[in-house]
Amino acid sequence: MLCKDSIIKIIKGLDLPLNEYWITSGSALVMHGVKEAANDIDLGCTISLWELKKQKSKLGREKDIRDIKLIDEFIKSRY
């Protein structure tokens, strides 16, 4: 279960531009003090952040490389 402090720590660790995403669902309720904890973090994002592939390519971390493969597979399946 993720409390407010855990959610903040995880989101900060993603190092996303502040005006490019928002927290939704249960995690949003935690952030606003409606409930104590959530099971996961659901995010919405702007189109420019959706183009995460560019950012992930620059970072080049192992987890980013895995995400790039997922992004490519998703795009292939849609078009």
Image (cartoon, rainbow, N blue to C red):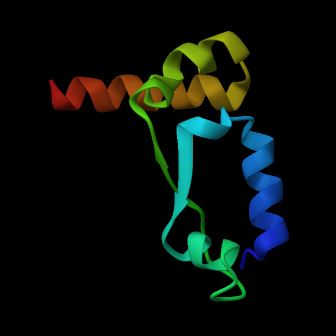
Which quadrant of the figure contains the C terminus? top left
Image position of 22 with respect to 62: above or below: below
Residue 6 picture location, percent across and down: 81, 66
Image position of 7 with respect to 16: above or below: below
Which quadrant of the figure contains the N terminus? bottom right
* In the image, farthest residue toward the left: 79
Mark count: 0
Residue 54 picture location, percent across and down: 54, 13
Residue 42 picture location, percent across and down: 52, 60
Q: Residue at x 80, y 43 (%)?
A: 13
Of the pair 23 and 78, the residue shown nearer to us = 23
Of the pair 78 and 29, the residue shown nearer to us = 29
Q: Residue at x 79, y 46 (%)?
A: 12
Q: Quadrant of residue 74?
A: top left
Q: Quadrant of residue 20?
A: top right
Along the horizontal axis of the image, is 7 left or right of 42? right
Q: Residue at x 72, y 50 (%)?
A: 11
Along the horizontal axis of the image, is 42 left or right of 39? left
Image position of 35 with respect to 73: above or below: below
Along the horizontal axis of the image, is 15 left or right of 23? right
